[in-house]
Amino acid sequence: MSWNLIPKTDAERAGDNWLAEMEPAKEEKRRKKLAQFKSEVEAALAPEKKLSKMFEAILEMTHYAGKVDGLREGLELSEYGWRIQEDKPPAFRSMMKYFVKNLRNPEKHSAEKVCHYLDKEIKNIEMHITSEVSIRPPDAWACETWTVALEKKRNNVEVLISEAKKEAKGERYCTLMAWRTWGWREKQKKVRADKPKEQLDRPELF
């Protein structure tokens, strides 16, 4: 299935709509229907040996092409994820997550709101010492907080925020998030079946 069929929305909607159609139960139903249609077409073409062979060849080539396309698109998506991780700072990725969560709340898209969110996240990390703080403003800016950075380096901050917002609304990032969301849901189902009281954390994206 081509990526251009994926809705250009946030991960929640993509996960609920497009990828929901790929859940194992629904996929099994489609495969049964495909087998049924294949059998009926083969029966109809049985008297025509040439057409029957052409139909089998078409099925074989379609199956092969689907595998190749799927592998190529999966590789491109994986490379995209790694490229974001390697080329963009952690703060950029945090901005992307922020915009994904608030795509339907444009009033939260201002530079002030984003900087407040990042500063709040930094304080939470410092307070709970969950990990090393890596989402501070770039060292070259010599700013301790994003609020200060917005005052002293407003243009730089707004450019970075604009790029993060554009990336967060892009089809590939939403697709990657949707895949991970679906994978997380599948793991949740298995965990609930084995250990009903155990819960998995929602997937971290980058």
Image (cartoon, helix red, strand yellow):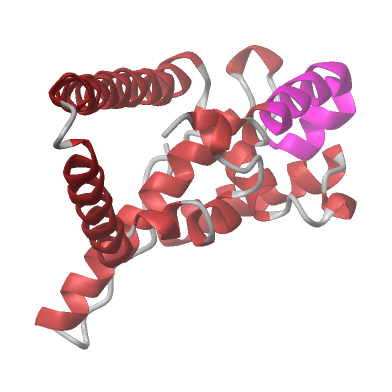
Q: Is residue 34 shown left or right of residue 79?
A: left
Q: Nearer the viewer, residue 188 or 152?
A: 188
Q: Is residue 159 magenta?
A: yes
Q: Nearer the viewer, residue 164 or 73?
A: 73
Total numbered badges shown on the rendered structure: 0
Q: Nearer the viewer, residue 59 or 89?
A: 59
Quadrant of the image occupied by residue 7: top right
Seen at 42% across and 36% down, the residue is 206
Seen at 83% across and 25% down, the residue is 158
64 w.r.t. 145: above or below: above
Farthest-out residue, left: 194
Q: Is residue 178 visible?
A: yes
Question: Residue 94, how many percent across, how many down?
Answer: 57, 40
Farthest-out residue, front: 47
Q: Which residues are magenta?
A: 145-166
Quadrant of the image occupied by residue 78: top left
Q: Is residue 62 shown left or right of residue 12?
A: left
Question: Residue 205, how many percent across, how many down?
Answer: 43, 43
Question: Residue 85, how many percent across, how many down?
Answer: 42, 24
Quadrant where the N terminus lies?
top left
Question: Residue 151, how many percent across, how many down?
Answer: 88, 29
Instruction: Look at the magenta stretch and give its main secondary structure.
Output: helix
Q: Is residue 159 shown left or right of residue 23?
A: right
Seen at 17% across and 46% down, the residue is 43
Seen at 73% across and 36% down, the residue is 146
Q: Nearer the viewer, residue 59 or 120?
A: 59
Q: Is residue 136 visible?
A: no
Q: Is residue 51 shown left or right of residue 148?
A: left
